[in-house]
Image: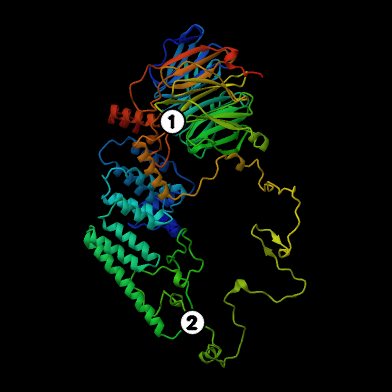
C-alpha cells in the first residue's frame, strides 16, 4: 500500500501544486492514488457533506466550516485545476464575509484572502482592495504576501514600502514581520552585490543553464505569462541563501547590457585556439533534433505550417498597391462558412460569451448590489432562499436542501441507534 | 373558492406533494408521491383513495409503467415497483444518492431514473432489473422522455439529450438558455422539442433538431412574477405538463398560479385563480380533459408556516387548452 503510494508520488511530482503550509503526506498519497479515473464517490460524498454543512451550520463561527472545506480541497486536489473548484470556493468564501467586520482581523480569513489574491490575475489590486476595506490591516501575513508579490514583479522598493506600512499599522505578529523584512533586505543587498560583481568580472559570455523546477517570473501585468526561455533573468530569484557566488542564477541579462561581437577579441580569447589533436571523428552535434542531412537544393519545397495546421504551399501574395474596385451593391458575405458541423453542440449553447471579468470585479459588483439592496433600489426579488442554494461552491436545488434538513432531523431523532443498526447488517 | 369545474381530492398526503401523474390509459387514475413517505393511488372520478404504499423515506417522484404497476423513488435511494392489483412491493434496485426523477419510455419499453448521484439508470420493467448506468456531468434535477430520446436537466444549467436506443454516447450536450437553475423539463408530445423552466420566473421553448432553421424558432419568456409595491417578485417555475392532443402546456409556479400557454402562437391561453400555496406538480390526464394541480409548499423559503397541502382536479375545456386558430 505504502509502496504503491510512493510510486504514485514519484510519478506525479510535477503535478502537485505547492502550498504555503505544505502538504500532509498521507493525504497526498491518498489523493494521488484515488485520482486515477475522475472523482471517486468518496470524494463526491465528502464534498457534498461539506456543502450541506455550509448551509446547515447555525453556530457562531461559520468561517470555520469554510476554512475546513478549503483546506480539505487543497489537500484532496493536489493538481489544483478546474475540478477542485478551489477558485470559486475561495471567491465565495471571501465574498460571504465581507459584510460586517466580524472576521476582518481573523488570521484564517486573511489567509483565505491571500489565497484568493494569489489566484487572481492581478494580486496587487486585491491587496490594495483589502487595505481599502480594512481587511487584515493588522495582520503581518497580509504585508508579507503583498511584499512578496511586489518582489516577484521586480519592484523591491515597493516591497520594502509595504513592510514600512505594516510596521506603521503595528501588524501582528511583529516578530514574523520583522524576520521577513530582514530576509527581503538580505536578498536585495545580495542582488546588488551580484550585479556589482558581474560588472567587475569580464564579460565572458557564460553558458546559461536551464534550471529545472525553478519558479519563473511572470511577464506582463495583466495576464501572467510564463516566459518560454527558462534561463537567466526569467527565473525568479531564489530566496534561499545557499547559492554560491560563482554560479550566478541571475545571468548577464539582468545587467541589460548587450554583448557586442568583437572580432579581435574572440580571436584572442580563442575557444577556437587550434588544438593539436587529430579529428578522429566529427564532433557530435549537441542539438541533434535540428540536424539536417545534406540533400539536393533545387526543387525542394519547404513544408510550412499555417496557424490551422494545414500545409501552405506558397507565401501569401503581397498586398496590392492599388485599391481593388468593389461594386457598391456588392455585400460582403455575412457569414463565414462554419467549419464545425452545426449539429455538434456550439449552436446549442445560446448564451453570449460574457464580458471579461476578474474575480475582484465580481466581488466589487457584489458589494455594490448589496448596498443597493439595502437602500431599497433593487427592482427584483427572488421568492426562494437563493443565498442558501448558491452559497457553496456547488449548487443545491430546493429539494436537496430540504432533504439535508430531513436527514439531519432523522439522525438526531434516532440518535446512535440507527447508526449502530446500519453499521452491522 | 373551488368552482363547479374543480374539486379537492380527499385523503390527500400529509406532507408536501412531490409529484402527480395520471395513468397512461385510464383517465381517472392518479398517482401521487409525497414527502410523507407514501405513494397513493386515487380514483379521481369517484374522489377516493384506492390504495397507498410506503417508502422508508420521502418519495420524490413516481410513474406508471402500465395501469397496474407504479414505480417510485426518493430520499432512500431505492427504486420500488408496486403491483396495484395485488398490493405487492418489489425493490428493483438503488442509486448511490436520492432518486429525483422516475419516468417511463413506452417506445423503448424502459423505465428511467435520475439521481443526485450524477447518473441516469435504465431499468427493464418486465424482469425487472437494471439495464445500465449512465454518468451525467452533474446532479440530475429533472428528466423527460420524447419518443426514444431522453432529455436530462442537471445542476450547472446543463441539458443532455440521449438516444435511448443507443446509450453509448450523449447525442447532444446543451447549455440551458436560461440564466438560473433548471427546475423542470418536459418534452412536447409531438417529440420535436421541450420546454424548460427555471428557478427565476422564466420558461424556454427549445427544439431538438440542431439545424439552424429549427434553432431559430426557440424562444424564452418571463412568467410567474408578481409586482408588489414597485418590486418585482420572481418565483420558481416548478411544474410543466403538456396537453397530449393540442401540444399546449401548463406551468405552475411558487406564486400559486397555473398558466396555460400556446407555444405556437406564443400566447397565454388562460390563467386560473391563485391557489393557496406553491404549485409543486401538474398533470394532464391522457385525453386532456382534466388537470391535476398539486398546491403544496415546497420549503423554498425555509421551514415556515404554510397552508395545507392539497390536490385539485380541474375539468378543462378546449377553450382553455386549444391554440386559437387565426
Question: At which x and y percent is residue A147?
Answer: 33, 62
Who's the residue at 44% across and 41% down the image?
A: A41
Q: Are marks 2 and 1 on the same chain?
A: no
Q: Residues within 10 Å of mark 1 (few under 14, many from 20)?
A: many
Question: Of the numbered discs in the image, which one, if any, rests on residue B274?
Answer: none
Q: Quadrant of residue B288?
A: top right
Q: Nearer the viewer, residue A259 or B105?
A: A259
Q: Residue drawn at (45%, 21%), measured in percent from left and top?
A: B279
Marking on residue B98 = 1
In front here: A265 or B131? A265
Quick check: B249 above or below A349?
Answer: above
Kindly report which numbered mark, 2 or 1, lies closer to the viewer in this rendering.
2
Q: Residue placed farthest to the front in the image? A: A328
Residue B108 lies left or right of residue A49; in this view the side is right
Residue B99 rendering spot, x and y as whole percentages: 46, 29
Query: Which residue matches tag 2?
Result: A205
Q: Is A269 displayed left or right of A22 in the figure? A: right
Residue B275 position by quadrant: top left
Residue A170 place in picture, x, y as percent = 22, 59
Amino acid at each position: 500500500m505504502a509502496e504503491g503510494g510512493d510510486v504514485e508520488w514519484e510519478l506525479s511530482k510535477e503535478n502537485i501544486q505547492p502550498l504555503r503550509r505544505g502538504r500532509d503526506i498521507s493525504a497526498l498519497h491518498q489523493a494521488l492514488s484515488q485520482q486515477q479515473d475522475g472523482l471517486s464517490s468518496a470524494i463526491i460524498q465528502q464534498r457534498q457533506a461539506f456543502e450541506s454543512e455550509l448551509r446547515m451550520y447555525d453556530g457562531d463561527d461559520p468561517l470555520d466550516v469554510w476554512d475546513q472545506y478549503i483546506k480539505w480541497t487543497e489537500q484532496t486536489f493536489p493538481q489544483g485545476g478546474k475540478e477542485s473548484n478551489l477558485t470559486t470556493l475561495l471567491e465565495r468564501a471571501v465574498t460571504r464575509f465581507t459584510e460586517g467586520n466580524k472576521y476582518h482581523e481573523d488570521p484564517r480569513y486573511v489567509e483565505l484572502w491571500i489565497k484568493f489574491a494569489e489566484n487572481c490575475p492581478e494580486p496587487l489590486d486585491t491587496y490594495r482592495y483589502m487595505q481599502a476595506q480594512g481587511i487584515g490591516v493588522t495582520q503581518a501575513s497580509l504585508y508579507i504576501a503583498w511584499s512578496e508579490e511586489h518582489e516577484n514583479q521586480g519592484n523591491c522598493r515597493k516591497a520594502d514600502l509595504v513592510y514600512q506600512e505594516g510596521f506603521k499599522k503595528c501588524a501582528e505578529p511583529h516578530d514574523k514581520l520583522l524576520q521577513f523584512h530582514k530576509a527581503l533586505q538580505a536578498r536585495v543587498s545580495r542582488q546588488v552585490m551580484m550585479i556589482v560583481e558581474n560588472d567587475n568580472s569580464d564579460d565572458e559570455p557564460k553558458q546559461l543553464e536551464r534550471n529545472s523546477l525553478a519558479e519563473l517570473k511572470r511577464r506582463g501585468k495583466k495576464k501572467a505569462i510564463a516566459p518560454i526561455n527558462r534561463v537567466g533573468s526569467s527565473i525568479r530569484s531564489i530566496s534561499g541563501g545557499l547559492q554560491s557566488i560563482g554560479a550566478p542564477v541571475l545571468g548577464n541579462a539582468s545587467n541589460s547590457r548587450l554583448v557586442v561581437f568583437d572580432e579581435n577579441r574572440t580571436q584572442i580569447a580563442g575557444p577556437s585556439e587550434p588544438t593539436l589533436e587529430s579529428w578522429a571523428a566529427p564532433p557530435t552535434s549537441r542539438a541533434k533534433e535540428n540536424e539536417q542531412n545534406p540533400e539536393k537544393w533545387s526543387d525542394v519545397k519547404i513544408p510550412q505550417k499555417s496557424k490551422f495546421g494545414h500545409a501552405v504551399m506558397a507565401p501569401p501574395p503581397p498586398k496590392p498597391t492599388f485599391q481593388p474596385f468593389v461594386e457598391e451593391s456588392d455585400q460582403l458575405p455575412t457569414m463565414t462558412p462554419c467549419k464545425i458541423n452545426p449539429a455538434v453542440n456550439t449552436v446549442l449553447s445560446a448564451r453570449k460569451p460574457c464580458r471579461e471579468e476578474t474575480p475582484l470585479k465580481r466581488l466589487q459588483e457584489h458589494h455594490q448590489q448589496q448596498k443597493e439592496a439595502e437602500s431599497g433600489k433593487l427592482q427584483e426579488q427572488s421568492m426562494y432562499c437563493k443565498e442558501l442554494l448558491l452559497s457553496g461552491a456547488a449548487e443545491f436545488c430546493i429539494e436537496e436542501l430540504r432533504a439535508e434538513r430531513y436527514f439531519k432531523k432523522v439522525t438526531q431523532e434516532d440518535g446512535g441507534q440507527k447508526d449502530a443498526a446500519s453499521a452491522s447488517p | 373558492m373551488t368552482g363547479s369545474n374543480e374539486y379537492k381530492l380527499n385523503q390527500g398526503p400529509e406532507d408536501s406533494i412531490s409529484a402527480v401523474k395520471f395513468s397512461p390509459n385510464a383517465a381517472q387514475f392518479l398517482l401521487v408521491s409525497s414527502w410523507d413517505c407514501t405513494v397513493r393511488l386515487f380514483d379521481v372520478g369517484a374522489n377516493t383513495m384506492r390504495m397507498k404504499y410506503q417508502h422508508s423515506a420521502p418519495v420524490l417522484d413516481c410513474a406508471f409503467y402500465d395501469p397496474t404497476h407504479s414505480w417510485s423513488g426518493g430520499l432512500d435511494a431505492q427504486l420500488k415497483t408496486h403491483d396495484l392489483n395485488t398490493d405487492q412491493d418489489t425493490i428493483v434496485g438503488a442509486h448511490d444518492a436520492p432518486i429525483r426523477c422516475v419516468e417511463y419510455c413506452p417506445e423503448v419499453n424502459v423505465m428511467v431514473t435520475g439521481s443526485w448521484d450524477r447518473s441516469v439508470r435504465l431499468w427493464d420493467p418486465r424482469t425487472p432489473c437494471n439495464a445500465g448506468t449512465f454518468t451525467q456531468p452533474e446532479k440530475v434535477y429533472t428528466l423527460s422522455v420524447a419518443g426514444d430520446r431522453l432529455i436530462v436537466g442537471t445542476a450547472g444549467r446543463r441539458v443532455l439529450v440521449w438516444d435511448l436506443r443507443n446509450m453509448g454516447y450523449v447525442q447532444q450536450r446543451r447549455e440551458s438558455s436560461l440564466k438560473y437553475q433548471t427546475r423542470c423539463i418536459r418534452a412536447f408530445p409531438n417529440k420535436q422539442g421541450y420546454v424548460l423552466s427555471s428557478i427565476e420566473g422564466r420558461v424556454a421553448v427549445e427544439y431538438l433538431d440542431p439545424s439552424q432553421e429549427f434553432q431559430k424558432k426557440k424562444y424564452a419568456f418571463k412568467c410567474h412574477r408578481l409586482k408588489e409595491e414597485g418590486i418585482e417578485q420572481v418565483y420558481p417555475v416548478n411544474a410543466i405538463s403538456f396537453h397530449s392532443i393540442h401540444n399546449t402546456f401548463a406551468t405552475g409556479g411558487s406564486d400559486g398560479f397555473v398558466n396555460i400557454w400556446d407555444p405556437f402562437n406564443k400566447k397565454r391561453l388562460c390563467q386560473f385563480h391563485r391557489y393557496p400555496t406553491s404549485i409543486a406538480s401538474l398533470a394532464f390526464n391522457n385525453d386532456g380533459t382534466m388537470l391535476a394541480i398539486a398546491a403544496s409548499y415546497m420549503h423554498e423559503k425555509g421551514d415556515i408556516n404554510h397552508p395545507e397541502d392539497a390536490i385539485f382536479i380541474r375539468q378543462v375545456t378546449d377553450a382553455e387548452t386549444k391554440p386559437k386558430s387565426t
